[in-house]
Amino acid sequence: MSDKLCGKKILSLVKKQDFYNLIVLDSVNSTNSYIKELAVSGTPHATTVIADSQTNGRGRLGRDFFSPCGTGIYMSILIDPTKIKLPASYLTIAAGVAVCRTLTDICDDSPSIKWVNDIFMHGKKVCGILAESVINSETNTPSYVIVGIGINVSTAAEIFPGKLNEIAGSVFPENITRNEIIAKLLDEFDNICANAEIENLVDEYKKYSLVLGKKISFTKNGKAFSGTAIDINLDGNLVVILEDGQEIILSSGEVSLRSSNFLN
Ligand code: BTN
């Protein structure tokens, strides 16, 4: 089965065929960086850039995102917040839920989300999401948001360099091409963005959560804490009860779980 990325094929599969200005590239530094340049020159809402490989794929907290050719999906969607019903601050959650719905449909195993937005399957991180906003300095609201999604589809374990292969894995779906996966994902993301029912979205996000009810550790203002993740509130923030009973609400950053907790 050929698994070559093809914009025409993807557009023939998505429900809203006229919605996406789809750009498919063989290789690019980072689809997020590329689309940011397009945004400056006025490319429209829902422009989507997909690359077969990235030479400088970027992750959260200044990390790299390993993006070898032929075995992953590296894509960025440009969102004009005035063109969707969902508030822009929920786009990261929306992307996480869209990926999980898609993976649930196409894989035997179930995906889980490690707050904020790392997607795990069979104990390994298989997908990362990087949402970046460009803020209008006059209104202090985002002029646009770039939602970058990287999925390891069929990257073999030995291909991940160094220690990365202890953490990263692939989804290995059967009998489905990357074009078909991308089309499903765009449809799911589009459906979520067209809806403003935040409570339902956060509830669905919580169902996929890998951290709720688990012992976690994290740092805040340079200080290390550990506690139990008890809730994700309506703003998408993680509510943690520390060992001394104090409640902390995390709106950003990263939490760690014991390695045995990564298996659902
Ligand atoms: C993370 O794991 O911290 C987030 C990874 C996000 C990777 C995707 S791949 C497509 C888009 N382009 C990038 O440079 N990064 C995102």
Image (tube, grey):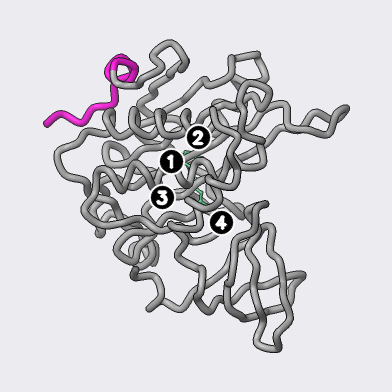
Q: Which mark is residue 116?
A: 4
**Percent position of residue 87, x then y:** 66, 35
Which numbered disc, 2 or 3, marks the residue that appears first in the sequence? 3
Assign the N terminus to one quadrant of the image. top left
Residue at point 35%, 62% (across, down):
124
Q: State the separation of the CA atoms marked 2 and 3.
A: 19 Å
Q: Which residue is mark 2?
A: 192
Establish whether ligand 1 lies closer than 8 Å to the Cβ of label 3: yes
The magenta stretch spans residue 70:
no
Near mark 1 (Cα within 10 A), the count class, few <14, some 14-19 or many ≥20, is many
Q: In the rendered structure, which segment of residues is drawn in magenta?
A: 1-12
Mark 2 Cα within 10 Å, few/some/many (few <14, many 20+)? many
Instruction: Tell me the residue at 24%/49% (across/down).
Output: 107
Sequence order check: which comes first, mark 4 or mark 1?
A: 1
Q: What residue sits 65% from the left and 14% below the top?
A: 41
Dot 3 falls on a residue whose secondary structure is: strand
Q: Which callout, 2 or 3, points to the residue nearer the camera?
A: 2
Q: With 255 as the anchor, is 209 left or right in this view? A: left
From mark 4 to mark 2, how far is it between C-alphas?
18 Å
Q: Nearer the viewer, residue 160 or 11?
A: 11
List the residue tagged with mark 3. 127
Pick the front one: 22 or 215: 215
Queried whether the magenta region covers residue 3, the answer comes back as yes
Q: Nearer the viewer, residue 90 or 165?
A: 90
Q: Nearer the viewer, mark 4 or mark 1?
A: 1
